Amino acid sequence: MEGNSSFHHAHCGSHDTSQSLREERLNLDMWSMLECVRAVGIVFVLIAILRARKIVNWAVFTARALWNLWDLNGPINYPLFGCALYLKWEIVDLTFQMESIVQDLVAKDPNQQGIVKVWLGPVPIVMLIRPRHVKVLLESNTNITKAWPYDLPSEWIGRGLLTRRNHRNLFFPNQTENVMRTRKMTTTSSKWQSRRKIITPTFHFSILKSYKEVFAQEGRVMVDQLDNIADTGREADIFPFLKRCALDIICGEWLLQCQTAMGTHLNSQTGGNTEYCDAVATITSIMTEYFRMPWLWFKPIWYASGKGFRFDRLVKLTRDFSLKVIQERRRWIEEEGIEDEGMAFKKSVFIDMLLLQQAANKLTDEDIREEVDTFMFEGHDTTASAMGFTIWYLGQYPQYQKHVHEEIVSVFGDDTTRDPTEADLRQLQFLERCIKEALRLMPSVPILGRTLSEDLEIEGVTLPAGLSVAVAPVLTHRDPDHWERPFEYFPDHFLPEKESARHPYAFVPFSAGPRNCIGQKFAIAEEKTVLSWFFRRYSVETVEPYPGNRPIPEIVLKPSVGFSVRLFKRH
Ligand code: HEM
């Protein structure tokens, strides 16, 4: 018994000790947890203090946006998540969903206000659809700052003409920064202005004439390549052919003058410089994925997915290539003794113009590299897609294709080998109407954006400074108030009398106002030249029309299944 009781005591004693030990450990755990909470709290307070101004600005901006945009039409937006909760991730599904959302909005907009609000998570975006509203934004000389989605392209093309804006923040786009950095913005916008002033003369009408030789030369290479698939009865996607042709045009001769500068030509059409060409293609496709997948906007995920590292590696490759070309070209200029802009002007070489103005305008090699890559990016995918959609439509409308062929015969007769001259191209009026009509329904840049630097008043609605405002040519171009057959491919929309009677902002594939496309005449001339080659040699049958082939709003509008066609030689 005694033994038992002592055992009991001993046991109780050890029980007490272990309990007190446990209690002590619990206290310790509680204490360390409290310490942790306190530490996290302190970090939060510190961050809040450090970012107080930003948080206050963000709160003020959001309150203003909520208040000012309250009555605007728009899809269902949930607090904090906006419409991100129900948007489809799969890009083709998303295009169907967008179509039905837009139809719904139009039905709910009896007085056709055409100003639509969308919340993407906590970020408000306003979309302008009516030409009269689009005019107010695009004509503004102050609201010229590009919106945050231009941040990723600028990791590649830097702050060149296209992407120049007043702040960069890939990690978390905070619109209010624009409002806070007004002084910096003035500097940036004046930088854009001076860059635009330097570059504009390279697109002078008289210079454009000499580019036409390049268009003709590369167009001929393209149709020679297509000869291999014509008359075989096989379906073939002609998009890669068009892309390589456009790339050779933009950087092979005109932009970089590789042929004379380095003894090499880009020659992507015939398999040259494949590493560089593939890098450009992969960079654009990674950028597209980035826009479609918002989780990639967070740098840790961007790099963890492997895309970030791949993107950086390819950007370095293209950057080194461009810098090498710039250095080679500088050496060539020195050897040839080209001293002033007048001489470069005659030779119409973009890169020479920049190099010769380098000292006067304090341009670094990196500045020139940014512009070279900007033109490479903006100047090839856009035109390739525009040419592709024109061919795709004409392959579905035999009556218009017949008209194009008749016009071509009236200009070239049976000659399928001579280069088109400027006079030839001037006569191809119907072909030009077909090109414009394809740009109307399938504008290469389907949507563009600005971040407001100051409040913008549109018909009684005050859009607050800091707001992202989008213009969607793809919707504006289908406004039933301005187009006879809004949803149909109808080239006569562009008969001269109809064009002159139309609202000038009803057709804005090249944007408009101070930040319009600097290369629009270049693009139309390039398209006309290459397509005149194409239709001189071939008839085309489209294999997959709409809706099987859907336009995908990547950075540039692209077909979901390529431009699959059957080609037939005409002679
Ligand atoms: C069919 C072909 C093309 C279309 C539809 C097109 C469309 C556009 C649009 C809509 C913009 C305004 C973008 C914005 O505000 O965010 C733009 C800007 C620009 N485009 Fe084009 N473009 C085409 C071809 C070209 C070509 C061939 C070049 C160069 C040779 C070029 C160079 C530029 C540049 C440098 C800008 C920026 C201008 C600035 O902000 O000052 N584009 N383009």
Image (tube, helix red, strand yellow):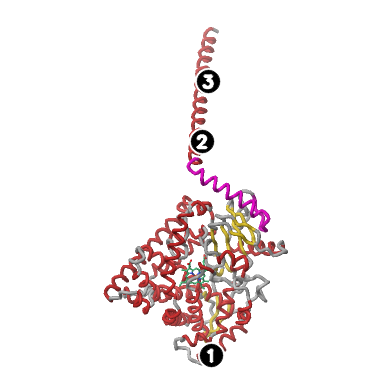
Q: Which residues are magenta?
A: 49-78
Between discs 1 and 2, the one toward the N terminus: 2
Disc number for residue 19: 3
Q: Nearer the viewer, residue 359 or 92?
A: 359
Looking at the rendered structure, the secondary structure element under dot 3 is: helix
Could you tell me the amino acid type at mark 1? Val
In which quadrant will I find the N terminus?
top right
User: Would residue 52 be counted in the magenta stretch?
Assistant: yes
Q: Nearer the viewer, residue 478 or 93?
A: 478
Q: Answer yes or no: is residue 76 visible.
A: yes
Name the residue furthest top: 2
Within-10-Å neighbours for mark 1: few <14, some 14–19, many 20+: some
Res. 256 image quadrant: bottom left
Measure the C-alpha gap from mark 1 to mark 2. 78 Å
Looking at the rendered structure, the secondary structure element under dot 2 is: helix
Q: Which residue is mark 2?
A: 41
- Position of residue 165 measured from the top left corner of the image (x, y, whole percent): 47, 59
Q: Which residue is mark 1?
A: 409
